[in-house]
Amino acid sequence: MTPDTARMIGLVDLTRLESTDTDDLQEAEAIQTLCRRAGSDFGPVAAICVHPGWIALADRELRAAGLRDAVGLATVANFPAGTASIEDTVAEIKAAIDDGADEIDVVLPWQELLDGRIEAVQQLLAASRMACSNHGMKVILETGELAEPDLIRQAADLAIACGADFLKTSTGKVPVNATLAAATILLEAIRDSGRDVGFKASGGIRAASEAAAYLTLARQMMGEDWVDAQHLRFGASSLLDDLLAQAQEQAEAPAHGQDSAQQ
């Protein structure tokens, strides 16, 4: 297995953020399966990310699997539309932390930003930062909806100024999600800020080759030492399958080569 494949497995936020109107028993089983997938022969993922109502179950499942110390537990707030009130967002964050969440992925009110209501954006992010306390806060910018580079950069700068620990591209619920162009803007904002802020590419990343492109970009812009789970994540559900398949293929390659040589 190449070092990059192992590294990317350890950068995955293994995510299940399906519609909340699914059958509870079916969803509980899906969350349990998700948590069991968090560990593998090639190492654990960085975190599990689920809806707030499933945090307590995910916490129990990770503990039962002996993974809770190795795998973070993340959830979302003001999700997916970014239109909840400050009061509701803060209440959601506090409840999730009480249930065991380590990290909160909060949606920046990007529609307010499009309308030029900068103060409203700042107020929600500042209140979210306070509610998160010493827990991680990833700010979802919904870069595909902002679309314009100047607006994406403005959103990134606002999020950093309000105390974001990570800038995250997307909810995965809109037509355009993570792109390398948007990632470049977010990484530039992080680099220019001089602050210890990470980057999370999320939405539509399904193949190891796609994740590798973001890994390469981060290396080029931020340096090799910056690339770790404290600074770079991939929010995805199916990406892990491709990474594990690639890791298995790479692990078996020397044995196949040796068999051929013996024949």
Image (spheres, helix red, strand yellow):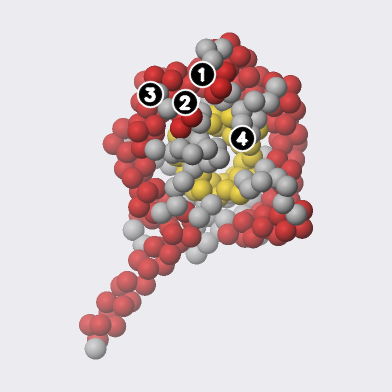
In the displayed structure, 24 sits above or below 158; it is below
Disc 2 marks which amino acid? Leu
Looking at the image, can residue 98 be seen?
yes
The label number, if any, that marks residue 146 in the structure image: 2
Mark 1–mark 2 Cα distance, whole angstroms, equals 7 Å
Of label 4 and label 1, which has the lower sequence position? Answer: 4
Circle 1/circle 3 CB separation < 8 Å: no
* Secondary-structure class at tag 3: helix
Disc 1 marks which amino acid? Leu
Please give left or right for residue 60 compared with residue 79 in the image: right
Circle 4 sits on which residue?
80
The label number, if any, that marks residue 224 in the structure image: none
Circle 1/circle 2 CB separation < 8 Å: yes
User: From this viewpoint, which residue is outermost toward the front?
Assistant: 175
* Secondary-structure class at tag 2: helix
In the displayed structure, 20 sits above or below 87; it is below
* Secondary-structure class at tag 4: loop
Of label 1 and label 3, which has the lower sequence position? Answer: 1
Mark 4–mark 1 Cα distance, whole angstroms, equals 16 Å
User: From this viewpoint, which residue is outermost toward the bottom?
Assistant: 263
Name the residue at 27% across, 77% down.
257
